[in-house]
Image (cartoon, rainbow, N blue to C red):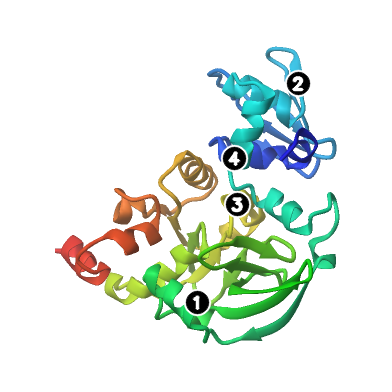
């Protein structure tokens, strides 16, 4: 990644990776509490069309590189090394396309959407302890840069696919959330689809009523669901145990009633799927023990 590539990433995604969520926003701008110091009133503004920031309390501003240099107290080279390790969803799409600003849809072709049958994909699902949840998934075969690939596909609301296998984590098509509706008055929100699949694996042991489900496919997509949360009487959140997850929970709780942070179920683990993979005895026995 170079500076030009880094500066084209949405600054909102950079801030989110560091655990910062806006206090308010609209289509043109987003306001944050000062990321560099403690304050009670938001003075950090992002101009979305320019992808630039300005901190009114200090009278400074700039692009992604300027922000991250100051935030990390790092050199440009150190910033770029840091950025390479952040797994930014927007950069992955750029990297796959291999051409800046080009639509990913011009650089790949899906030529197979099937039930999951490939032994390598079935084994990967077993390793992630969700091998019994293939009804939500597809086996996607696609061509990119004159090479054929395949992976586990989880469809989003815009017709794109989150693609996973042991070696890749990409999105084909437009990035979006995935909604699964059951006509319920309650909602469960998950950060990634492996967390959703993990929940479905133990759902009956939790003895909860049926619900609707939203899978963000990236915590940075949280703003896409804010308008739909008000229709639910109860909302359960299953986010990662990290700073971004903390702030996402806080933001939803501040704007909605009857919100439950359900991370106590896997409080000692990175996320719900990590708990599924590493917890022993099996999750269903753990759930029963927690209910005693």
Q: Residue furthest front?
A: 147
Q: Quadrant of residue 107?
A: bottom right
Name the one closer to the observer, 165 or 220.
165
Cα distance between the residues tagged 1 and 2: 46 Å
- Labels 1, 2: front one: 1
- Quadrant of the rendering where the C terminus is positioned: bottom left
Q: Is residue 116 above or below residue 188?
A: below
Name the one closer to the observer, 292 or 69.
69
Residues marked 3 and 2 touching at CB (< 8 Å): no
Disc sitting over residue 16 in the figure: 4
The residue that mark 3 highlights is: 222
Q: Residue furthest left?
A: 292
Which is nearer the N-term, disc 1 or disc 4? 4
The residue that mark 2 highlights is: 61
Residue in view at x 20 percent, y 69 percent:
285
> In terms of secondary structure, where does tag 3 sit?
helix
Which is nearer the N-term, disc 1 or disc 3? 1
Neighbourhood count class around disc 2 (C-alpha, 10 Å): few under 14, some 14–19, many 20 upward = some
Residue in view at x 58 percent, y 80 percent:
138
Q: Quadrant of residue 137?
A: bottom right
Residues marked 1 and 3 touching at CB (< 8 Å): no
Which is nearer the N-term, disc 1 or disc 2? 2
Q: Is residue 170 above or below residue 147?
A: above
Name the one closer to the observer, 245 or 5.
5
Q: Is residue 200 above or below residue 118?
A: above
Cα distance between the residues tagged 2 and 4: 18 Å
Q: Along the horizontal axis of the image, is 176 left or right of 82?
A: right
Does the image show residue 22?
A: no
Cα distance between the residues tagged 3 and 4: 10 Å
- Labels 3, 2: front one: 2
Which is nearer the N-term, disc 3 or disc 2? 2
- Quadrant of the rendering where the N terminus is positioned: top right
């Amino acid at each position: 990644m170079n500076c030009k590539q880094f500066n084209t990433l949405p600054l909102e995604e950079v801030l989110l990776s560091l655990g910062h969520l806006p206090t308010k926003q609209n289509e043109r701008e987003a306001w944050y509490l000062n990321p560099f110091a403690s304050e009670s009133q938001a003075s950090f503004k992002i101009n979305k069309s320019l992808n630039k920031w300005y901190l009114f309390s200090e009278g400074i501003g700039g692009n992604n590189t300027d922000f991250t240099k100051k935030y990390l107290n790092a050199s440009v080279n150190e910033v770029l090394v840091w950025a390479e390790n952040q797994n930014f969803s927007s950069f992955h799409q750029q990297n796959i396309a291999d051409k800046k600003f080009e639509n990913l849809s011009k650089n790949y072709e899906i030529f197979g959407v099937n039930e999951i049958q490939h032994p390598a994909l079935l084994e990967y699902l077993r390793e992630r302890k969700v091998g019994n949840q293939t009804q939500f998934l597809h086996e996607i075969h696609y061509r990119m840069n004159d090479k054929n690939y395949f992976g586990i596909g989880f469809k989003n609301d815009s017709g794109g696919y989150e693609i996973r296998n042991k070696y890749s984590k990409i999105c084909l098509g437009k990035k979006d959330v995935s909604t699964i509706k059951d006509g319920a008055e309650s909602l469960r929100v998950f950060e990634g689809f492996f967390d959703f699949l993990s929940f479905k694996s133990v759902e009956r042991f939790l003895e909860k009523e049926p619900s609707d489900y939203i899978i963000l496919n990236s915590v940075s997509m949280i703003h896409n669901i804010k308008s739909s949360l008000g229709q639910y009487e109860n909302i359960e959140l299953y986010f990662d145990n990290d700073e971004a997850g903390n702030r996402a929970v806080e933001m939803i709780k501040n704007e909605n009633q009857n919100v439950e942070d359900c991370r106590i179920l896997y409080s000692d683990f990175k996320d719900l799927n990590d708990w599924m993979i590493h917890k022993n005895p099996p999750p269903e026995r753990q759930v029963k023990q927690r209910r005693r």
